[in-house]
Image (cartoon, helix red, strand yellow):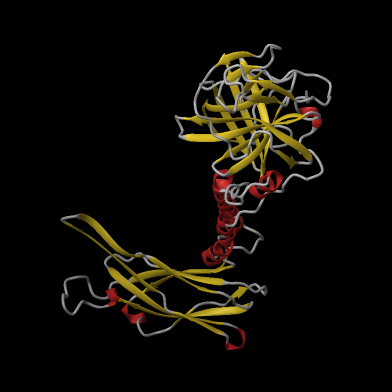
């Protein structure tokens, strides 16, 4: 939109069209918003006329070859329940950001002016607000907008009539905010600031209204220009929210039995224990079902420990595990290094409640000398290890499964975005209290 001058306010009335002769070439110039429009551009020679003066003074004789816009001046179309006539057309560009777009000035003698903007196959119908918008990002009339871009809009071509002195070379600073399907546009020329609010339209809606070919209006609300930022932001926010929720559900302790230690003991063993079975005292697991984890730890250095563990419960229910612990470290020309870990664990997904005991058969490299290198470590070195049994342990497996189940949704929404609701055909999408009154 370009408004270096706001349209004058007058009571709604049907304005009669006025036909003039161009002082430059003698061609006919139709003024549709007679008494409101200030300038009109001759479609024959491109001269700009001052139609606010009864004598129709020639402002600027461009004398260039004109081109007919896709929606011709004088065409009529039904949008949002109102019959509009195309009164003016201008092309604008922002050289800094490499953007260009076309604007059609629509006129209805009872509703006033609207702007139909085509930007990279995206269609937006704008109307000027008669109020200031302090901060769209913080919220305006129940919506929070995201800034989509700023720049300098320069008029590169004009045709038809306008209610301001439109001419090639006019420049205004712009800022655009979006909360699909709604947009807010801010234009500033000197001390004058104009706010407009628009709604995205389907290309088919515009094509049907003005009888255009389908390949010309293939864009719209679902086009790439209108939905690129919205889709990307939507995917990011859905993904971030899903991960945060899953982490919270995974980490927050729900109930007193979550990660409850039901057994823990440290064993001091020597070579005499190798091949024999260590039997623990009986411990009780709550009757509620759930997983159970057995964790083994041993402070070994350049050594290994292997434990054959059987957990025997009521009715000889047995759970078997053979955790192996290996940890080696050293130093070479590249610096210090380490391999393995001093702890390991085994998780059983479902263990019924009852009384259990552990049967442990320990094996360790420190129990005997290395046959290849007897001096590598002392034979019959004692080995200590600790076994801990924990009930209802959070499972990262469940976390990743849940995450995999959620990922398809944002991906699907990115490639197949939902179409924002189109304005009702029998009503104006703008509250009358928030818009500039029609002339």
Height in image: 8 above or below 272? Answer: above
Height in image: 202 above or below 162? Answer: below
- Quadrant for the N terminus, please: top right
The spot of residue 160 in percent (x, y) is 63, 27
Toward the bottom, the furthest residue is 315
163 or 119: nearer the viewer: 163
190 or 328: nearer the viewer: 190
The spot of residue 21 in percent (x, y) is 65, 20
Height in image: 91 above or below 221? Answer: above
At 62% from the left and 38% from the top, the residue drawn is: 178
Height in image: 317 above or below 407? Answer: below
Judge from the rendering whether residue 279 lies leftward or rightward of residue 22; answer left or right. left
- Residue 144 visible in this rendered orientation of the protein: no
- Residue 22 visible in this rendered orientation of the protein: yes
Quadrant location of residue 14? top right
- Quadrant for the C terminus, please: top right
């Amino acid at each position: 939109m370009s408004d270096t001058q706001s349209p004058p306010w007058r009571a709604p009335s049907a304005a009669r069209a006025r036909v003039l002769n161009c002082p430059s070439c003698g061609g006919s110039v139709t003024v549709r918003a007679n008494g409101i429009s200030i300038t009109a551009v001759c479609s024959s020679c491109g001269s700009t006329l001052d139609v606010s003066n009864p004598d129709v003074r020639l402002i600027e004789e461009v004398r260039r070859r004109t081109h007919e816009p896709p929606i011709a001046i004088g065409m009529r179309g039904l949008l949002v329940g109102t019959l509009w006539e195309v009164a003016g057309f201008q092309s604008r560009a922002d050289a800094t950001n490499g953007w260009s777009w076309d604007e059609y000035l629509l006129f209805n003698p009872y509703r006033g002016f609207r702007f139909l903007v085509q930007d990279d196959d995206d269609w937006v119908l704008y109307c000027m607000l008669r109020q200031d918008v302090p901060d769209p990002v913080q919220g305006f009339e129940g919506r929070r907008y995201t800034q989509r871009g700023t720049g300098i809009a320069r008029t590169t071509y004009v045709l038809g009539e306008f209610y301001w002195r439109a001419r090639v070379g006019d420049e205004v600073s712009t800022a655009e905010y979006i909360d699909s399907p709604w947009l807010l546009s801010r234009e500033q020329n000197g001390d004058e600031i104009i706010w407009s609010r628009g709604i995205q339209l389907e290309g088919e809606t515009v094509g049907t209204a003005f009888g255009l070919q389908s390949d010309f209006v293939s864009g719209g609300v679902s086009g790439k220009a209108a939905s690129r930022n919205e889709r990307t932001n939507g995917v990011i926010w859905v993904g971030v929210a899903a991960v945060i929720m899953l982490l919270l559900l995974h980490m927050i302790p729900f109930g007193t039995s979550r990660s409850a230690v039901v057994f823990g003991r440290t064993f001091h063993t020597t070579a005499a224990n190798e091949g024999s079975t260590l039997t623990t005292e009986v411990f009780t697991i709550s009757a509620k079902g759930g997983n159970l984890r057995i964790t083994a730890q041993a402070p070994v250095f350049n050594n290994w420990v292997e434990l054959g563990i059987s957990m025997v419960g009521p009715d000889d229910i047995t759970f078997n595990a053979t955790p192996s612990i290996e940890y080696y470290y050293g130093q070479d020309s590249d610096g210090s290094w380490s391999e393995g870990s001093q702890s390991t664990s085994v998780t059983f997904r479902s263990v019924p409640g009852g009384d259990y005991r552990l049967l442990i058969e320990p094996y360790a490299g420190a129990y005997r000398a290395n046959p290849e290198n007897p001096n590598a470590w002392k034979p019959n070195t004692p080995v200590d290890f600790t076994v801990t049994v924990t009930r209802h342990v959070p499972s990262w497996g469940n976390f990743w499964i849940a995450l995999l189940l959620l990922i398809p949704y944002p991906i699907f929404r990115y490639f197949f975005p939902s179409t924002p609701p189109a304005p009702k055909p029998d009503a104006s999408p703008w509250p009358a209290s928030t818009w500039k009154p029609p002339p």
